Image (cartoon, rainbow, N blue to C red):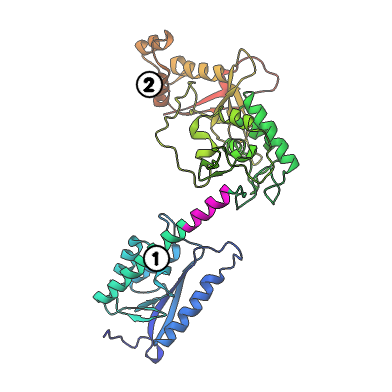
């Protein structure tokens, strides 16, 4: 039998309490962990112990890899140290059940190693006192882990089947309402649906999604969670199969077993299927909603397209914000509106700075050839190969990367039509 010193008044054994809930989405008041901590205090009193401090993780899964549990981490650290922050000695842990502490073998290993790092400690739950040093105590912990893992698998399978059955019946997704529909997820939101339909038409006609996102921002449009639209969110919205009435589940378009035709949802579509297929065809496979939606399997092995312009990735926005600070956002390539500038570099962040693509690329070459510091200038052989098209774009970009950290693009002057190479300010390595 484990012996304990009378470290607390009345000879009570000082223990720490831990509580955890997986979800707190409805009330968001932490009542679950609060109730568990109350039960832990009662359990401690019933077994001659006293809770000296408590740790909790509200709305934290213990079965998913990579989920941060600050309360559990502090518990482990204090067990290893042997004392709480206030200096009180720890002689045991109390919790409602083992699955509150661990649902993965890694967490069980961490917990047992920390708990048994000092002799004479106990582990309490509603079943009673457990000796974590004995073989029976270890076997009980392993049995609890097996039960938790089995329960997690059964619950995951049950939930997956439930979502699949709802999807086959065409029931809308749960969660936040999709952009373009009202809260019932069935009736169209007139203004948003019109924006989506217009964006699909513009994208099919060749307009960049960043330009569409910028138009939405200028109109004051926000997403259903309050965020500002960007190229990625616009892409997901206009390539989602729900825009034409199709139902998807976990990144796959659902087909009716009887007919082999796509399952139709119960909601009102925004565009016909042929428009959805046409807009999807304007994107590379890795960008489509079907490979980016919640629960969708990630596409791997898709090669990223090589940059087609010299300055891609090297230019930063030099526009000033309202508070006087410099934007510093990356400049992205967009389609230009003139023969002299068939492409432009525009800020992906503030959208208040752009420069002719050929102007910026020529400015980079001038800096490398004539205007840069002596140690950064190209050799005659390299210059000859560069100027006589005996060098690939990727080789040129490697030279640029070796010479510049980046280049800052100052905003242009309205109405000035001549090229101002001084707008490109280099930051040399």
Left or right: 361 in relation to 89: right
Q: Residue at image x 39%, y 26%?
A: 402
Residue 166 lies in magenta, yes or no? yes
Left or right: 139 in relation to 42: left
Which quadrant holds residue 209?
top right
Label disc, if present, on residue 375 of the rendered structure: 2
Residue 45 % position (x, y):
44, 86
Q: Is residue 156 above or below residue 278?
A: below
Q: Which residues are magenta?
A: 158-168
Q: Residue at image x 51%, y 42%?
A: 251
Residue 145 % position (x, y):
35, 66
Q: Is residue 34 above or below residue 304?
A: below
Closer to the camera in the image, 385 or 174: 174
The tag earlier along the polypeptide, 2 or 1, is: 1
- Residue 178 seen in the figure: yes
Residue 414 lies in magenta, yes or no? no
**Location of the C terminus (image quadrant):** top left
Q: Secondary structure at mark 2?
A: helix
Residue 201 % position (x, y):
67, 28
> Which residue carries the number 1 mark?
148
Q: Secondary structure at mark 1?
A: helix
- Residue 326 seen in the figure: no
């Amino acid at each position: 039998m484990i012996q304990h010193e009378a470290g607390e008044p009345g000879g009570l054994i000082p223990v720490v309490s831990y509580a955890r809930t997986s979800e707190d989405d409805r009330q968001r008041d932490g009542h679950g962990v609060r109730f568990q901590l109350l039960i832990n205090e009662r359990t401690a009193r019933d077994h001659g112990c006293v809770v000296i401090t408590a740790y909790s993780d509200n709305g934290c899964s213990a079965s998913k890899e990579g989920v941060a549990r600050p309360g559990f981490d502090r518990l482990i650290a204090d067990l290893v140290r042997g004392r709480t922050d206030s200096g009180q000695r720890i002689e045991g842990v109390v919790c409602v059940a083992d699955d509150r502490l661990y649902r993965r073998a890694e967490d069980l290993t961490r917990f047992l190693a920390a708990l048994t790092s000092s002799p004479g400690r106990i582990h309490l739950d509603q079943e009673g006192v457990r000796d974590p040093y004995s073989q029976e105590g270890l076997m009980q912990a392993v049995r609890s882990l097996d039960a938790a893992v089995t329960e997690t698998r059964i619950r995951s399978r049950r939930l997956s089947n439930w979502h699949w059955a709802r999807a086959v019946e065409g029931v809308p997704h749960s969660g936040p309402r999709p952009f373009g529909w009202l809260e019932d997820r069935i009736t169209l939101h007139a203004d948003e649906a019109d924006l989506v339909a217009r964006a699909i038409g513009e994208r099919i006609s060749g307009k960049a999604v960043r330009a569409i996102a910028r138009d939405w921002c200028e109109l004051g449009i926000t997403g259903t969670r309050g965020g500002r639209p960007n190229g990625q969110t616009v892409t997901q919205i206009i390539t989602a199969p729900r825009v034409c009435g199709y139902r998807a589940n976990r990144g796959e378009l659902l087909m009716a077993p009887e007919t082999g035709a796509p399952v139709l949802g119960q909601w009102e579509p925004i565009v016909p299927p042929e428009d959805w297929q046409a807009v999807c065809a304007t994107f590379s496979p890795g960008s489509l909603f079907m490979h980016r939606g919640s629960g969708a399997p990630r596409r791997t092995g898709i090669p990223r397209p090589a940059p087609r312009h010299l300055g891609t990735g090297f230019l930063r926005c030099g526009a000033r914000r309202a508070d006087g600070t410099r934007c510093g956002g990356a400049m992205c390539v967009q389609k230009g509106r003139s023969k002299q500038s068939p492409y432009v570099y525009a800020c992906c962040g503030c959208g208040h700075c752009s420069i002719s693509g050929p102007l910026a690329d020529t400015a980079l070459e001038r800096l490398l050839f004539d205007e840069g510091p002596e140690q950064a200038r190209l050799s005659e052989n390299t210059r000859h190969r560069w100027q006589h098209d005996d060098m690939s774009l990727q080789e040129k970009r490697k030279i640029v990367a070796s010479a510049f950290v980046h280049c800052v693009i100052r905003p242009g002057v309205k109405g000035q039509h001549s090229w101002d190479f001084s707008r490109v300010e280099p930051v040399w390595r």
